[in-house]
Amino acid sequence: MTEDVRVYVEEAPGQRREIQAPTDMGLSLMEVMKADGYDIQATCGGMALCGTCHVEVLAGPELPEPSDDELAMLESLPVMTQGSRLSCQIRLHPRLDGLVVRLMPQDA
């Protein structure tokens, strides 16, 4: 049986859109958001090298710690918040059900 996870994308303050995604395919949050129509360039193909999939985690379960590569990329971005993550580095897992993120602008 496939276990779907629900992720919410805050498109504007108070406006959240639900995305449902399977957790048995090893997909990243970036892949799911891109497939759902969000404008994510993902020029590096999910290798934590470009930062175009930068999201801010607003609420939900605690995520695994970011890797050194992810942290280095986040620190090079024009805007970084306490909840900044690269969505290509977040693998969908049943424990992430209810995660709330906001796509960060590419230009500060």
Image (cartoon, grey):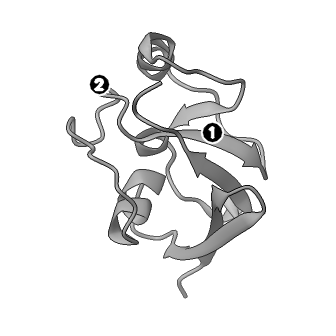
Instruction: Name the amino acid type tagged 1.
Output: Glu
Image quadrant containing the N terminus: bottom right
The residue type indicated by label 2 comes to Leu
**Pointer 1 residue:** 56
Identify the residue at horizontal 29%, vertical 25% (top origin): 49
For mark 2, give the secondary structure: loop
Q: Is residue 62 above or below residue 78?
A: below
Residue at mark 2? 49
Task: Depth check: give the residue in front, 43 or 96.
Answer: 43
Direction from residue 23 to residue 73 in the image, left or right: left
Q: Residue at x 50, y 12 (%)?
A: 75
Q: Is residue 95 left or right of residue 103?
A: right
- Residue 74's place in the image compared with 75, above or below, is below
Viewer can see residue 26: no
Q: Position of residue 68 (x, y in %)?
A: 48, 14
- How packed mark 1 is, by other alpha carbons closer than 10 Å (few <14, some 14-19, many 20 or more), is many
